Image (cartoon, rainbow, N blue to C red):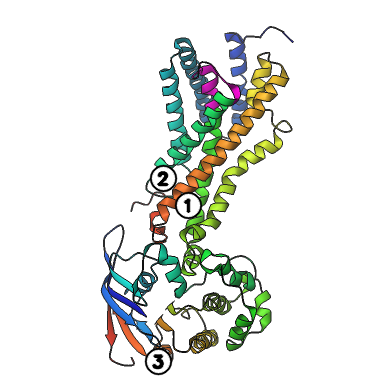
Amino acid sequence: MNAPYLAISWPSLLLAASLVLINGAVSLALRLGLEKKLAIAALRTVVQLLLIGMILEWVFAIDRWYVVLAILALMTLIAGRAAAGRGSIRYRGMGLDAIVSVSASSWLVTALGLFAVIRIDPWYRPQYAIPILGMILGNTLTGVSLGLERITEELSARRAQVETLLSLGATRWEAFRLPAQQAVRAGMMPVINAMTVVGLVSLPGMMTGQVLAGQAPGQAIRYQIVIMFLIAAASGLGTVAAVLLVYRRVFSRAHCFLFWRLEERGKTG
Amino acid sequence: MLSATNLERRDAQSGTVLLHPTSLHLRAGEHGVVMGPSGAGKSVLMRSLALLDAPDGGELRFLGEPVGGHEVPAYRARVAYVAQRPALFAGTVEDNLRLPYTLLQHRRRRFAPDVIVALLEAADRPASFLGKAARDLSGGEAQLLNLLRVVQLAPAILLLDEPTSALDALATAMVEALLRRWADGNAGETATLWVTHDPSQARRVGNRFFRMQGARLEELGGVP
């Protein structure tokens, strides 16, 4: 099992890149008008990946904890911002809530994975910390954004039900419970789906990568199982955190539903 | 029973006055009727009295005690707000009627079918009504269910925010009959505040009359 790693040369890369011309030809033949978009997307793929490759090589080379930490923080911030970007309803402080729930859950679970399960040394080892946090962030961001989207929509659509429950003597938590269940369910669904079909329909990129790099499939699979559960935990935790933060925003201590804090996106108010 | 002193509400965002300082004292056996043009602040008053929206000033007392904070759910169970458009939950009529008993506030109570059947009788509905799917109900039946759900919990005061304005004459009569049964069943230990646009309904259900205009409440001397 020790075949040499096959490096990709620049000419080979160019050959692969030329495959995008197939899509371009399809677009031209069927008059889809996608040539420009395709060209830009292809260019972005190359530039973004080359850039991140350079950054990673630099980070690995200088091997300082504060540089790694800065990169991790930047990744987290971008993920948090992206998580608040969905949905038609927003509220003041939504961006902050998204960043808090994405970062708290991802960092907690990543720390657990890196220090307790994989046991990296030194503690900031970038070859592990950056890609693993990245994978966890990517999935947590999906969970949080779905959860936020769903909870704000449920609360707006079910305002009458929420207030009816309050009128019947429900506590704010009891009035919030039903929409919250829906939202947490929505946020957890992608990761449950992913765990259901992993290995059958999809071969995760990380596992494929490890196998391509010469790692024995047995080890690659162990890594993948660990990652899968880290992702599930972080994504579940992040979704719950986001929904709870919304609870704090839209219910007052006196059990009032502050529905007016939920605004349609784009409306200034 | 219910005593509001200088109750005040402003819009949380714009600061516009929604309710000028309003005082209102409702004693047992009193049935207040609030009339007035749309947008005058009738719903604001009712929602403030139910503490669904927190007042920005003034004081609210129920049975002599000030209400606020964690007692609000208990207060709302005794002083119940009924909205114009009923919000029903998935399932049957009975599922909807059982819903309040799942709340912390009513955990010591049990759903009592015989109470419901007696109330249904007052509204001229058969017991089979309980098995109907909530989503198949007509507007009148939905409001009937909405009221049954509240009345079975034996609240002391009902804040009725145009409960029949979307209903036809027959359904309105049904709702009024049900509410009469609730008031009679509690031997004068109840009160209502009823928002309506219909003067004849006001005369049927009220014994005190108010007019709301420009976010101000004034009591009228007699029947409108």
Q: Is residue B195 visible?
A: no
Numbered disc 2: what chain? A
As helix, strand or loop, the secondary structure at mark 2 comes to helix
At label 2, counting other C-alpha atoms closer than 10 Å, the crowd grade (few under 14, some 14-19, many 20 or more) is many
Q: Residue at x 55, y 75 (%)?
A: B149
Residue A160, how many percent across, how many down?
A: 48, 65
Q: Which mark is residue A94?
A: 2
Numbered disc 1: what chain? A
Amino acid marked by disc 1 = Thr
Residue B207, how many percent across, how many down?
A: 37, 90
Amino acid marked by disc 3 = Arg
**Distance between the alpha carbons at the discs numbered 2 and 1:** 10 Å
As helix, strand or loop, the secondary structure at mark 3 comes to helix
Q: Which residue is disc 1 drawn over?
A: A152
Q: Residue at x 32, y 72 (%)?
A: B60
Numbered disc 3: what chain? B
At label 1, counting other C-alpha atoms closer than 10 Å, the crowd grade (few under 14, some 14-19, many 20 or more) is many
**Distance between the alpha carbons at the discs numbered 1 and 3:** 43 Å
On the same chain, marks 2 and 1? The answer is: yes
Q: Is residue B195 left or right of residue A165?
A: left
Q: Which residue is disc 3 drawn over?
A: B203
The magenta span reads A117-134
